[in-house]
Amino acid sequence: MYQQDAEVEKQEILKRYRNLLRIWKPRNPVDKKLVRKAFKMALEAHKDMRRKTGEPYIYHPLSVATIAVEEIGLGATSIVCALLHDVVEDTEYTIEDIRGLFGDKVTAIIDGLTKIKGIFDQHTASIHAENFKKILLTLSDDVRVILIKLADRLHNMRTLDALTHEKQLKISSETIYLYSPLAHRLGLHAIKSELEDLAMKYTEPAVYDAISKKLKESAKSRTRFVNKFIYPIKKALTEKGFVFEIHDREKSIAAIWLKMQKKEVPFEEIYDIFAIRIVIDSAVETEKSDCWKVYSAITDFYRPNMDRLRDWISIPKANGYEALHTTVMSHTGQWVEIQIRSRRMDEIAEKGYAAHWKYKEAMHINSRLDNWLDRIKEMIESPDTDAMSFIDDVKGFFFLDEISLFTPSGELRSLPASATVLDFAYAIHSELGNTCIGAKVDKKLVPFTQVLKNGQQVEIITSLKQSPKEEWLGYVVTTRAKTSIKLAVRAEKKKYAKSGKEKLGIYFTQLGLEFSNDNIKKFMAANNFSSIVDLFYSVSLGTVGVKDVKLFAASNVRNGWQNYVSKGSSKVSGSEEADNPPLKRVQTARDGRPTVTDPAAIDYSVAACCNPIPGDDVIGLRISDQLPMQIHRTKCVKAQELITVYGNKMVAVNWENLESISFVTEIKVIGIDRQGLINEITRILSNDLNLNIKSFHIDAMDGLTEGAIALYVKNTANLNDALIKLNMVDGIKHVTRIN
């Protein structure tokens, strides 16, 4: 527990302030005076405030300012804004007070930060998707608003232990879903990796701890290997006259776990847990050729894998990242990734947009990062108001790798790696997309659904008879294309909406129902329509008719509206028994452990996306009062998305484990094919563990076998017993739960 001591706190505050100045190294006395004034104002404003940890609140703005300087590379104006970022929101000072003391530029940034904070619901610590647009809009005004907000989020994640378990999950989900991709897109790789690791610490604590432990255990042997591996490279580069740094970079815990899942291998089989980074001192004019000279020196000792050569010097990544990557075979038979950068490239790689801006004017460049910042306004100003689709578009827009494509005249265009011909057409002009029927890609005729590859030249073919269809949304990945298609389709639907509304009104009147807005909304929900235009359009086409209204009317009269909606909701999917195990609403105690507070059972359904079972860490989301609560595993990707959008609908819950209830879960088995293997697997599951098998699918090819088994289990202990027993079977190499 934090112990309060006024004098000790005063000394600690001064120590942290001096540390900020030491890292910043102010050269201009005017800037130093401005920062001191901001510090004094923040100290006074927050003098009676404390954080959840019990520490003085001023520790937080000081930490945010330090991150902004040390880890992002921002200057005096940003330090002032970081120190004052909570003053207007949390104290009696106004935005006009800031303007009078620090001028318009600081005021504009503080105002942006205050508006962002105002989006957050202080009771739920969650952000709503519709309001995320407000955050992104600040990118086009002053990117420092977002950079300081990322510093603020990073410090909050570093001190998340003081919050309840429920808030930890909410903030972690929001961080992994939105802030990590935003940091990635702004080139802040180190911050992006740390945000992901810290989020994983709370969403998947067992996995996080296990990988952390293995990294510590393997650290010494890894250091010995690296020292031996880099020795000949260091010697060769020194002889060639290079001034350089060479060291190893450990992959983040979240990245290691992602690779373990993707490749379905244990920690010990991940070969690129670390990478070697070489940073050379080189003039801008010669840095490209110097990086290739370093590559040449490396290949004198180690054989490269040509499929893993990545040249991001000639065409940098969309977030400004420049480097030369190669993967080589060591003398011990282990693949090793090597990253080659100049000092300028390294600063951009570590500090992202702030460093990019520093070099921009000197090099007279307009990079893809600038183009991306120009394009972001277009996405934000989209008239599409659907929260979930907007969040999906944002995440994809931030995180997708990009490819370079060429128009017939040789103009370079950048699109996401999975973009199609239709995306390319819309990227040039919406009318070109609306009338696209195909393309010539490298002079060959292809359909508009063709996925494009890096470096291709694309010529769009159009027809005036063509018009966008709703199914086109499945053929595009860019926000511009989706928005243009939705607008065109919506305009087409509106032509029919009036006649559809008239028809529906007649149906309601014939069946004695009032044609009111309230009843229309209930009818929309009953028939799974999210848009009233879609409803009227379907009525005009005849896909929704008088039979649907009759069903609605009968259910509404006989059972009441609540029963009509809830009657279709499923209970536990795949359960052998008829009833759900009791699920209870819980609150988080001071020690972070869940405690039951409401003895009443809760109506719920189990999410098919992650198939939680008793024993899993779970959360509940009651998105609508008319629908049962959805139960997700805390590490479920879909749950992270839903928490981001509906954070105020989240409820902490836990199962009361009853042995009479069974749940379906799936496991994957990989091994060497042999006679009797299936027999032994079924014997262990059925006889030894007394588990019922719902389905069993296994394939054998070229001496290998791979299968998926669906089991009825009581809880995670049941499942873990099955995994342990099967992993011990001769010939089985790997058994995992299918998430």
Image: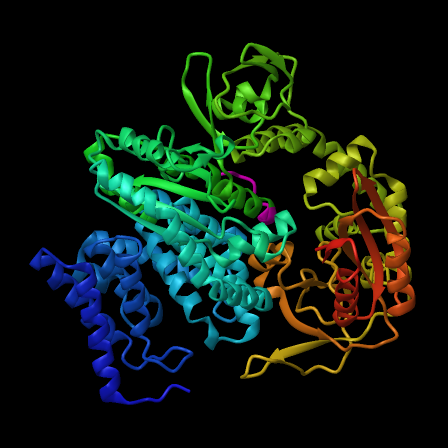
On screen, residue 562 versus residue 369, left or right, reads right
Report the residue that reaches farthest toward the front.
331
**Quadrant in which the C terminus appears:** bottom right
In the rendered image, the vertical position of residue 535 relative to residue 183, given as above or below: above
Start and end of the magenta stretch?
A: 382-388
Percent from the top left, x then y, of residue 409? 42, 12
Residue 21 is one of the magenta-drawn residues = no
Q: Residue visible at 13% across and 58% down?
A: 26
Residue 565 vs residue 292, the one in the foreground:
292
How many marks overall?
A: 0
Residue 453 vs residue 330, the one in the foreground:
330
Report the residue that reaches farthest toward the left.
29
On screen, residue 512 versus residue 338, left or right, reads right
Percent from the top left, x then y, of residue 152? 37, 62
On screen, residue 304 versus residue 465, left or right, reads left
Residue 473 vs residue 616, the one in the foreground:
616
| Residue 296: quadrant of the picture | top left
Is residue 370 visible from the viewing direction of this image?
Answer: yes
| Residue 16: quadrant of the picture | bottom left
In the rendered image, the vertical position of residue 469 relative to residue 672, given as above or below: above
Percent from the top left, x then y, of residue 328? 45, 39
Percent from the top left, x then y, of residue 183? 41, 50
**Quadrant in which the N terminus appears:** bottom left
Residue 387 is one of the magenta-drawn residues = yes
On screen, residue 636 versus residue 606, left or right, reads left
Display colour scheme: rainbow
Report the residue that reaches farthest toward the top.
443
Is residue 348 visible from the viewing direction of this image?
Answer: no
Instruction: Examine the residues drawn in magenta and state their main secondary structure.
Output: loop
